[in-house]
Image: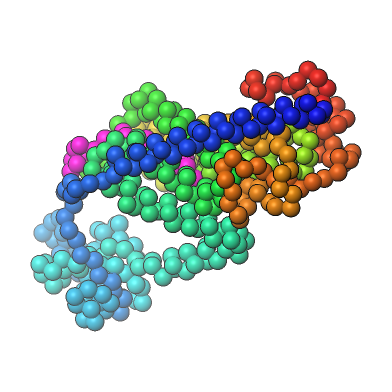
Amino acid sequence: MTRADTGTERDRAGGTQRWVTRAIIAVAVLTLIGLGFLWPRGEAPDLGIQPTQYVDAEVIQVERDVCDAVEADALTGCYRIEVLLTSGPEEGDEGVFLIRDTDFAVPEVDVGDQVVLLDVPTSPPPFRYTFSDFQRATPMWWLLGLFVAAVVAVGRWQGLRALAGLAGSGVIIVIFLVPALIRSESAVLVALTASAAIAFLAFYLAHGVNPATTVALAGTLVSLAVITLLALVGTEAASLSGLASEEAQALRVTAAALDLRGLLIAGIVIGALGVLDDVTVTQVSTVAALKRANPRLDRVEAYRGAMQVGRDHVASVVNTLILAYAGAALPLVLLFSQGAVPTGRLITSEIIAVEIVRMIVGSIGLILSVPITTALAAAVLTGREEVHPGHDHGFGAAGAVELDDTLAVEPRPATAEAGSVGDEIGEGGEGGTGDVEDVGWDDFGPREDPI
């Protein structure tokens, strides 16, 4: 690559970075406006949910007995469960609840189990307490602690910052996303605003404020916009009403103003964000690593090399995504498969079609995020000079730098080894023999002069 070519690459990279930075700043401003405009205000509407009281208890005795049937004037077999209440106004007292043989939804309960009971003080003593669930707080806290320890042990300071971003994402969901949806705001606008806010917070907290993070964020936001458009078109074309689940049907009765189709689209957008984070960060990191390995790598070579990694990533992640949706819907498929409904009609029924549309839309957005992000990364991170030798401002650096700062690259002698990295990715540094194909972006097109 000649000195003139190097200057041209540097000018192109600087110009592209400025446009990406301006676009990210514009999206940040729009996100803040959206947060202010859609922020939940006033009292939440009544969703028709009756107040309930739950208490914790420990099973101390299980006896076989005969009880009155609930739906008929008859007797039925049951288990009489004695418990010691460990929370609530009657803490320390003993109580009793029944599990009838006809209560198929209630699992088996043994002595020593920690359970959650629905407490209705106005009911007669034998019917005051009803089994609700098992207590799971302790094992879940242990698992959470193990997760945090693993993240910090492997990711160290960056892992700790990633956990801070995760906590911030949870706060946005709790204080903005859910309350705004309850107040019947536009579900699509709320989901896009919340997703953008989560992306800004998670990316810059975890990876620092640097050009590589900005590129990954830009690729994620563009992909989210594509997913939103596909979700809008897909739900409309498939005539999905959002009434597939029992919970949605209950909301239709108790909160008729809610846009259930909008809630479905919002769920698709929010669900896709986490997977996009993984893919876009990987692609930008790959381009940055290739550039550090061979500082003379141009944008076309960087794009082609990173896309080899991207194709492998897409193949594995899409497979994971599809299997995850299939696994979640497997009990439902097994249930319906026992009926007389033909397979074709079963698959196109709304309760199954919702998951299929969700899976396909998310997968398309995931696939498109790879070339989009890789192209942006190759355009911004190649053609740069090492202006800060010895300081790592690369992707995931602990120190934050300005958005217009440059990506530092460790100086390397321009030996044949440097060119061999390019050879391995298909085009060569100096002496590469592969032909450069048109990658689809004018700015990425191969130059006529030899590299």
The quadrant of the image that shows the N terminus is: top right
- Residue 4 position by quadrant: top right
Instruction: Look at the image and give the residue range highlighted in magenta.
Output: 252-274
Q: Main secondary structure of the magenta part?
A: helix
Colour treatment of the image: rainbow
Asked whether the viewer can see residue 343, the reply is no
Q: Is residue 447 magenta?
A: no
Where does the image place residue 194, in percent across and percent down from the top left? 38, 43
- Residue 329 position by quadrant: top left
Q: Does residue 46 appear left or right of residue 150 in this picture?
A: left
Question: Residue at left 61%, top 29%?
Answer: 15
Judging depth in this view, the residue of 69 and 387 nearest the camera is 387
Where does the image place residue 187, in percent across and percent down from the top left? 31, 37
Asked whether the viewer can see residue 144, the reply is yes
Question: Residue at left 13%, top 61%?
Answer: 74
Question: Residue at left 34%, top 62%?
Answer: 107
Where does the image place residue 395, in percent across and percent down from the top left? 63, 47
Q: Is residue 273 magenta?
A: yes
Q: Does residue 370 appear left or right of residue 328 in this picture?
A: right
